Image (tube, rainbow, N blue to C red):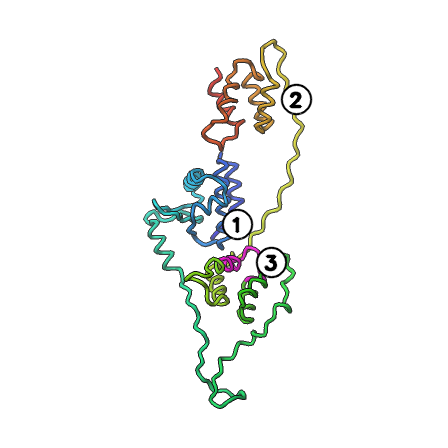
Amino acid sequence: MALSYLDRVVKFQKLIRQEKLKSSVRTVYMSFLDIFNEYGWKKQIRITYNEIQFVANLSLNSIKRAIIELKELELMDYRSKQGSKYIFIHLDGLIPEDTSYDDLVKMRAKSKKKYVEPSEPDDTPIPTSSPGPKGGVIRRQPPSNETYSPDGDHPPDDGLSRNWDDLKRNLSELNIPPGDYQKIVQLSNYGQIGHPVWKAFHEIGKRKGSKDAVKNPGAWIQWYINENPPSATAPVAPAPSPPPETPEMPELRPPDDGVERDWEVLKSRLEEMRCTWRGIHQIAELSGYGKTGSPVWDALEKVRDRKDKDIPPGAWIIEYLNKNTS
């Protein structure tokens, strides 16, 4: 049984408490949850690294390292190919080892239904009792909902976030006939925020004026929504926990032992780096409260050029002192 959005978040939070995960790994995984939610929780998605970068706001190398680590933790799987800008991401379990990137491309193409433009109503004479010239040409009668008017319709008051006005504006600008208009309103749940209907509008605008321009937007939007259904249950973000009360920290004072030190300068530098109180306390003890000649002064200069920027400066300095303090 597939996990819900919140189940995944809770499971990941438990893992964070057990494992020392880098902040980049956490960011990439949470970004994947957002991306999969937007795609309607498909089994797997094909996406570019640029799209991941846009959501995660990390460097390409950081994202690639995080993806490898997430796979080792069996939180996801992936397939990529040298020279391709795309990567397949799979969140539920592992992809079978004998399934390659090219196999996934073929499977995706096979499962993707092609949109066929509906034919225009023909002008074939059909029997009718309507008044008019005998043998006259009439078109097929429109369905009953051709009389639909959005002005007499209103979204339900159910607390969901919608953009009803923008939905009506987009459909009117595309000259959607009333029958299709009503169906799209119902399919999109009156323009619910995050619904695929908004991506459909974006795609139509992108194709405008090209050889792939959408000729029948009413039918195409319905096809697009059916091909890219929203998630069965929209995730509800958990209420944020109230910030923990900050305990009053005792003032750190160096011992009065006559040793030469510069504690105030060290303390000021650590605070500028936004080190935690506990980190400052630990660095104070390891450095003898900033003793002259302590490795802490070298650490303060070298911490700026550390290779792994994911490690907070306080933690890096503590590790440096543990390695270089006799």
Q: Earlier in the sequence, mark 3 or mark 2?
A: 3
Front residue of 136 and 1: 136
Give the class, few, some or many, for how many residues have Cα within 10 Å of label 3's Cα (few <14, many ≥20).
few
Residue 262 % position (x, y): 59, 16
The amino acid beneath tag 2 is Glu
Circles 3, 2 touching at the beta carbon (< 8 Å): no
Give the class, few, some or many, for how many residues have Cα within 10 Å of label 1's Cα (few <14, many ≥20).
some
Q: Quadrant of residue 188?
A: bottom right
Task: Please state if 42 lies on the left or on the right of 245 as rendered.
Answer: left
Q: Secondary structure at mark 3?
A: loop
Residue located 46% across and 89% down the image: 135
Q: Quadrant of residue 153?
A: bottom right
Q: Secondary structure at mark 1?
A: helix
Q: Is residue 132 magenta?
A: no
Give the class, few, some or many, for how many residues have Cα within 10 Å of label 2's Cα (few <14, many ≥20).
few
Residue 142 % position (x, y): 52, 77
- Please tell me the numbered disc located at residue 5: 1
Q: CA distance from mark 3 to mark 1?
A: 23 Å
Circles 3, 1 touching at the beta carbon (< 8 Å): no
Residue located 60% across and 19% down the image: 265
Q: Which residue is mark 2?
A: 251
Q: Which residue is mark 3?
A: 163
Q: Nearer the viewer, mark 2 or mark 1?
A: 2
Q: CA distance from mark 3 to mark 2?
A: 53 Å
The amino acid beneath tag 1 is Tyr
Task: Note whether residue 305 is visible.
Answer: yes
Instruction: Find the magenta span and give its range.
Output: 188-202
- Residue 123 vertical placement versus 106 (above, below): below
